[in-house]
């Protein structure tokens, strides 16, 4: 991205701490500009409404002007320690929980198949997978806001969407503004949704029901 050499000053007029982005009004041009927490030069305090920021003008991938290389005009705030909201997210814990969730999910799926009750258990599986997938998006989004190098593998997020968590993933993408602007991820995500829909349609079809019936050992 091309950047101007002239530093500018702006005042924060909107800040969404959970999503890590906001808008400021440039004092030089009086234009409203988008900015993101990742574009701060140093990790210090979190922005708040009416904070004065120094920045350089740049453009996003769509050619729209944005504020980057941000610093607080207040020297004390610039040197302040990161707030509790920017503490390191323990993604190793999230991956450990993922392992337990996969084990429990697989066990419930096998039990449903053995008793021939998969169609009746599907709503529960979808709710569980969606809630867990949303939580994973939250953890990854928080790590992104903090600028952590360690992130959850995208393949893991797509896996949980495939096993039924895609409604939760879709909600997280919209509510948390996470992963929705990455073309490759979105392309894979919608292929995963299509694959999941085709699998469920087959399981609920006559051939799928016959297949489930052959697997059932304890069904009537």
Image (cartoon, rainbow, N blue to C red):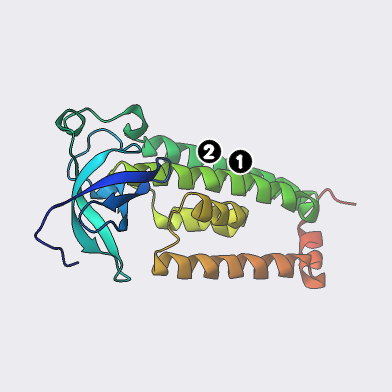
Position of 64 compared to 218: left or right? Answer: left
Disc 2 to disc 1: CB gap under 8 Å: yes
Q: Using a 10 Å C-alpha cutoff, classify the residue at mark 1 as few (fewer than 14 neighbours), some (14 to 19) or many (20 or more).
A: few
- In this rendering, is residue 211 above or below 44? below
Quickly name the residue at label 2. 100
Quickly name the residue at label 1. 104
Q: Residue at x 47, y 70 (%)?
A: 187
Q: Nearer the viewer, residue 123 or 26?
A: 26
Q: How far from the left and from the top, in percent, is residue 114?
A: 76, 50
Position of 208 compared to 33: left or right? Answer: right
Position of 203 compared to 182: left or right? Answer: right
Numbered mark located on residue 119 in the image: none
In the image, farthest residue toward the right: 220
Q: Quadrant of residue 162?
A: bottom right
Q: Using a 10 Å C-alpha cutoff, classify the residue at mark 2 as few (fewer than 14 neighbours), some (14 to 19) or many (20 or more).
A: few
Position of 169 compared to 32: left or right? Answer: right
Q: How far from the left and from the top, in percent, is residue 190?
A: 54, 68
Q: Residue at x 70, y 64 (%)?
A: 200
The Cα atoms of the two marked residues, 2 and 1, are separated by 6 Å
Q: Residue at x 32, y 31 (%)?
A: 87
Q: How far from the left and from the top, in percent, is residue 175?
A: 52, 50
Q: Nearer the viewer, residue 150 or 107?
A: 150
The number of callouts visible is: 2
Q: Is residue 84 at all visible to an observer of this figure?
A: yes
- In this rendering, is residue 91 above or below 177? above
């Amino acid at each position: 991205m091309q950047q101007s050499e002239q530093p500018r000053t702006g005042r924060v007029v909107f800040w969404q701490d959970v999503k890590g982005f906001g808008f400021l009004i440039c004092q030089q041009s009086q234009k409203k500009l988008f900015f993101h927490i990742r574009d701060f030069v140093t990790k210090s305090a979190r922005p708040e409404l009416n904070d004065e920021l120094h920045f350089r003008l740049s453009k996003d991938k769509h050619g729209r002007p944005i504020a980057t290389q941000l610093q607080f005009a207040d020297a004390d705030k610039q040197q302040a320690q990161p707030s509790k909201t920017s503490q390191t997210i323990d993604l190793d814990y999230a991956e450990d929980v993922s392992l337990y969730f996969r084990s429990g999910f697989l066990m419930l799926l096998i039990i449903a198949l053995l008793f021939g009750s998969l169609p009746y258990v599907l709503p529960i599986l979808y709710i569980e997978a969606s809630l867990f997938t949303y939580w994973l998006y939250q953890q990854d989004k928080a790590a992104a806001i903090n600028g952590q190098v360690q992130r959850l593998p995208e393949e893991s997020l797509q896996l949980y969407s495939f096993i039924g968590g895609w409604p939760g993933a879709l909600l997280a993408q919209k509510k948390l503004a996470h992963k929705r602007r990455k073309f490759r991820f979105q392309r894979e995500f919608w292929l995963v949704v299509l694959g999941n829909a085709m699998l469920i349609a087959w399981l609920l079809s006559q051939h799928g029901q016959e297949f489930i019936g052959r697997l059932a050992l304890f069904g009537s």
